[in-house]
Image (tube, grey):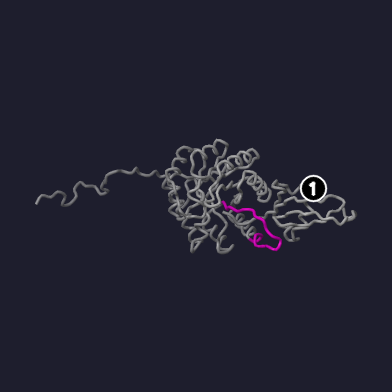
């Protein structure tokens, strides 16, 4: 993947409601790339779960799940609750 | 003091009838101490967005993990904040992956003002999640027909509210709650939300409810740890009172002290 030349285009995604621009390489970006772009290294080691456009995506499927312009991604973490 | 029986959650027997929330405490440490003082074995928690700069959630999660390990307890994730069946189903699946449990406290809110559950969306989400292998603990109103529908779908646990979340108003409609108990004798019934005082929890247990789920009443007390103990004792008292069988109310007074040979009784001067 790293051998592919960046064509300079950007793709806009919405992660947790925040607009994020991800570089589009020759290969279409997948969910794993988008998450690596958004999360800090510490957060990537924590427990979190992901939904793409309102549908759950399991951890095992991040790499094979392609993302498209305007997609909405939710990344959720454990928190206290009642 | 110990309970006569255990709480049955889809065949999992739990030796505390108090389910406790992990939110709203003055600090994570007080939350931990309150949960330990309560004797509860089931702690509720949730999932939320977290900005990259934010780290508070990670600390709370660490505390809750330690607690559950220390008490040999269980996590009960909720779907707080969901307003549609689709949202709730997605959040339940996300929770199952993170928390490694098929238990889900299913909340689908229909009204922003009193956080009243949406019964239509709740039933839809319940059906989908049960079919997907979840053990659904639905949070619902004290409506007999909704509870009956949830039971008919396959819910072994049903959690009607006492009153709206966080109000502390106690049991708004004892008649409804008693009716649900009488009509669904096989269901595990847990009173959820709106409890304000230990006596509210005791009353639910005296009605024959199987358990009580609460958060604000403990977390917002002046002394959450002491209040957690008070709720624990109230639940045990109510449960033991129900099991012991209470006397029937009577319309007229009956003296407790035997009247035979009462001194000065009808003594003629």
Q: Position of residue B77 (x, y in %)?
A: 61, 50
Q: Is A5 on the left-hand or right-hand side of B198?
A: right
Residue projecting furthest to the left: B269
Relative depth, front residue between B221 and A35: A35
Q: Position of residue B149 (x, y in %)?
A: 54, 37
Q: Is residue B261 above or below residue B34?
A: above
Magenta residues, start to end: B42-59
What number of labels is visible? 1
User: Which residue in the structure is indicated by mark 1?
Assistant: A66
Label 1 marks a residue whose chain is A
Neighbour tally class for label 1: few under 14, some 14-19, many 20 plus, Cα within 10 Å: some
Residue projecting furthest to the top: B152
Q: Quadrant of residue B67?
A: bottom right
- Helix, strand or loop at disc 1? loop
Q: Position of residue A42 (x, y in %)?
A: 73, 61
Q: Which residue is painted at 70% across and 46% down in the image? A: A56
Q: Is B248 on the left-hand or right-hand side of A49?
A: left
Relative depth, front residue between B93 and B156: B93
Q: Position of residue B6 (x, y in %)?
A: 51, 46
In the rendered structure, does residue B57 fall within the stretch colored magenta? yes
Quadrant where the C terminus of chain A lies?
A: bottom right
In the rendered structure, does residue B216 fall within the stretch colored magenta? no
Relative depth, front residue between B173 and B62: B173
Q: Which residue is painted at 71% across and 57% down in the image? A: A18
Q: Is residue B164 above or below residue B227?
A: above
């Amino acid at each position: 993947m790293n051998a592919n030349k960046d064509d300079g285009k950007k793709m806009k995604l919405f992660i947790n409601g925040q607009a994020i621009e991800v570089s589009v390489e020759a290969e279409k970006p997948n969910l794993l790339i988008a998450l690596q772009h958004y999360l800090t290294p510490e957060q990537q080691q924590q427990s979190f779960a992901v939904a793409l456009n309102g549908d759950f995506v399991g951890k095992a499927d991040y790499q094979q799940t392609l993302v498209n312009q305007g997609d909405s991604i939710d990344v959720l973490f454990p928190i206290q609750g009642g | 003091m110990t309970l006569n029986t255990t709480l049955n959650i889809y065949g999992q027997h739990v030796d505390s009838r108090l389910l406790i929330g992990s939110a709203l405490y003055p600090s994570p440490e007080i939350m931990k101490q309150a949960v330990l003082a309560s004797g509860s074995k089931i702690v509720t928690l949730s999932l939320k967005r977290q900005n990259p700069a934010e780290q508070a959630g990670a600390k709370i999660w660490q505390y809750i993990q330690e607690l559950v390990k220390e008490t040999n307890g269980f996590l009960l994730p909720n779907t707080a904040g969901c307003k549609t069946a689709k949202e709730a189903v997605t959040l339940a699946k996300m929770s199952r992956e993170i928390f490694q449990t098929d238990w889900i406290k299913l909340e689908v809110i229909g009204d922003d003002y009193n956080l009243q559950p949406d019964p239509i969306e709740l039933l839809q989400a319940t059906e989908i999640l049960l079919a997907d292998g979840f053990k659904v603990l639905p949070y619902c109103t004290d409506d007999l027909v909704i509870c009956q529908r949830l039971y008919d779908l396959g819910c072994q646990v049903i959690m009607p509210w006492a009153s709206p979340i966080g109000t502390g108003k106690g049991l708004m409609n004892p008649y409804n709650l008693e009716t649900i108990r009488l009509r669904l004798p096989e269901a595990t019934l847990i009173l959820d939300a709106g409890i304000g005082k230990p006596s509210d929890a005791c009353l639910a247990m005296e009605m024959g409810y199987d358990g009580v789920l609460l958060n604000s009443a403990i977390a917002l007390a002046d002394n959450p740890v002491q209040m957690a103990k008070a709720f624990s004792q109230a639940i045990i008292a109510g449960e033991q009172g129900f099991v012991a069988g209470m006397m029937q109310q009577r319309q007229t007074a009956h003296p407790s002290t035997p009247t035979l040979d009462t001194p000065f009784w009808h003594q003629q001067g």
